[in-house]
């Protein structure tokens, strides 16, 4: 055994460790390095720039995880000759999803028919503004859920803050864009804040998430506000990040706590990224201008 | 090829395989409680061949997991470094304990890891440092139980792999 592979007791000259322990300075340096990474990410959001590109590097790993299922489905399709039919159904499902998304907007537009300006703005949305993306991965932290979506090979010019929709309405917004993948912050995320307008009382407020499968809340709503349970909330478009008029959530409870100057309003989100693979990215060219 | 380099590559290969398994996406709530195989495989190598797995490996795979999970960059790196240090510091004790006791230690570690991931680093909620609630804590328990149940499987699989391929 080489001398550098073990420590030797100064008293008995016997080997104490067969394997040398880690050098404390190396551990300390690694801890400082990780802490610096964390601090720069928290303070300067440094990872937003590299994160989606990092996801691009991880794309082969994500595909490798799906490979056994692709192969199995491919073999089944080959032998059952249902491949064509499956792809047709897939295309129709995508088309259907697109139309449903537009329909959800139309419902709100019809509700607001008295407001001609809003109606006109709603009808100017066209199908070319909607692009399909496929879910690649959903983070395992349900308090801060981030969804990774595959953008495809063609460059469609996706940008940060583009809204992501499901068939039931608004799902989130893009926070980081890479070459092949993008990260989507979901509306259920505890960091997500969305300006919303209620369907019947027409009151504006800010909706904050609290994690997947949890109720969201409306922030700083005065006690004089006349919200109703069951009322739907739509994106109001204020702030210019989210487009106007997409369904977001439904009010499930309103509490008037005497020790709080605001109402405690809990809402349930209308959509979830679970059990769904395809989503739509909405690009408003108007907002770009 | 140099034996030491070959061993290192084989260990990295097993960690990449674990990362591939971790990156499989479940379309239900199991996604949030599935065991972290990368962490378990890293613990195994720290325990079995502590001189072959170092801090660099822990940081590298921690950052890769950060990218996969979209968590704050460096958070998993920090956790993996700490776990690597603990494993290497106490690997003599850890290695000779029965497998069920090792599973129990994995259970405790998994709870700590999941709770640290719930810390509110970005101050998204006022007056709260931890976003964990009852629902999250139950998820943490299931996650820890699944990790501890997966440990014997990982342990024997990695041992088989080590004895077959990784020659000292």
Image (spheres, rainbow, N blue to C red):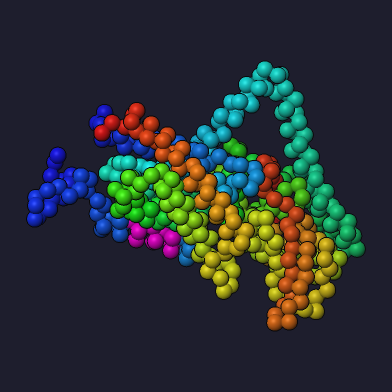
Q: Quadrant of the C terminus of chain B?
A: top left
The total number of labels drawn is: 0
Judge whether B7 appears above or below A225 on screen: above
Return the x and y of residue A238 as percentages of the image width and height. Answer: 72, 65
Q: Within the image, what quadrant is residue A232 found in?
A: bottom right
Quarter of the N terminus of chain B within the rendering: top left
Classify residue A53 as left or right of residue B42. Answer: right
Residue A33 forms part of the magenta stretch: yes
Whether residue A197 is situated above or below residue A146 in the rendered picture: below
Q: Is residue A41 left or right of residue B54?
A: right
Q: Residue at x 62, y 58 (%)?
A: B135
Residue at left offset 20%, top offset 44%: A18
Q: Nearer the viewer, residue A210 or B48?
A: B48
Q: In the depicted view, which residue is nearer to us: A28 or A131?
A: A28
Between A165 and B11, the one nearer to me in the picture: B11
Of residues B69 and A100, the one drawn nearer to the viewer in this rendering: B69
Task: Residue at 41% x, 35% y: name it.
Answer: B156
Hey, which quadrant is residue B26 in on the image?
A: top right
Q: Is residue B16 visible?
A: no
Q: Is residue B12 above or below residue A239?
A: above
Magenta highlight range: A30-40
| In this rendering, position of residue B1 left or right of residue A262 | left
* Magenta: main secondary structure: helix
Where is residue A260? Give x, y as percent.
70, 80
Task: Find residue A159 and report its horizontal and vertical position in percent.
Answer: 60, 51
Q: Is residue A86 visible?
A: yes
Q: Is residue A37 toward the left or the right of residue A1 in the image?
A: right
Query: Which residue, as the protein is rendered here, is positioned at the far right?
Result: A114
């Amino acid at each position: 055994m080489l001398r550098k592979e073990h420590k030797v007791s100064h008293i008995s000259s016997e080997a104490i460790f067969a394997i040398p322990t880690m050098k404390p300075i190396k551990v300390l340096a690694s801890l400082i390095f990780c802490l610096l990474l964390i601090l720069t990410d928290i303070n300067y959001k440094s990872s937003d720039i590299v994160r989606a590109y990092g996801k691009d590097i991880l794309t082969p790993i994500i595909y490798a995880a799906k490979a056994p299922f692709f192969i199995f489905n491919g073999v089944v399709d080959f032998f059952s000759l249902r491949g064509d039919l499956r792809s047709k159904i897939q295309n129709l499902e995508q088309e259907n999803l697109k139309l449903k998304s537009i329909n959800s907007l139309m419902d709100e537009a019809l509700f607001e028919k008295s407001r001609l300006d809003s109606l006109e703005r709603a009808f100017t949305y066209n199908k070319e503004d909607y692009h399909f993306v496929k879910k690649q991965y959903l983070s395992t932290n349900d308090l801060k859920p981030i969804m990774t979506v595959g953008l495809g090979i063609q460059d469609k010019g996706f940008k940060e803050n583009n809204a992501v929709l499901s068939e039931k309405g608004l799902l989130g917004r893009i926070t980081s864009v890479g070459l092949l993948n993008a990260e989507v912050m979901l509306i259920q995320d505890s960091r997500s804040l969305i300006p919303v307008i209620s369907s019947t009382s027409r009151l504006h407020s800010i909706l904050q998430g609290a994690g997947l499968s949890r109720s969201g809340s409306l922030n700083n709503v005065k006690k004089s506000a006349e919200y109703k349970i069951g009322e739907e909330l739509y994106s109001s478009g204020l702030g210019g990040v989210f487009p106007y008029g997409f369904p977001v959530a439904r009010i499930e409870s309103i509490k008037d706590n005497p020790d709080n100057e605001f109402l405690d309003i809990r809402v349930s989100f209308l959509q979830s990224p679970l059990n769904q693979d395809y989503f739509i990215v909405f690009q408003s060219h108007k907002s770009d201008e | 090829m140099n034996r030491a380099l070959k061993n290192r590559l084989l260990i990295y290969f097993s960690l990449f395989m674990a990362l591939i398994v971790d990156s499989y996406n479940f379309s239900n709530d199991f996604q949030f409680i599935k065991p972290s195989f990368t962490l378990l495989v890293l613990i195994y190598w720290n325990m079995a061949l502590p001189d072959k797995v170092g801090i660099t490996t822990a940081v590298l795979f921690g950052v890769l997991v950060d990218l996969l999970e979209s968590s704050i960059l460096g958070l998993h790196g920090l956790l993996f470094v700490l776990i690597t240090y603990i494993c290497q510091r106490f690997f003599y004790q850890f290695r000779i304990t029965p497998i069920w006791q090792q599973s129990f230690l994995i259970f405790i570690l998994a709870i700590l890891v999941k709770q640290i991931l719930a810390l509110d680093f970005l101050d998204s909620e006022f007056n709260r440092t931890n976003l964990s609630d009852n629902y999250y804590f139950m998820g943490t328990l299931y996650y820890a139980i699944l990790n501890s149940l997966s440990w014997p499987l990982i342990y024997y699989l990695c041992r088989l792999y080590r004895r077959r391929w990784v020659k000292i």
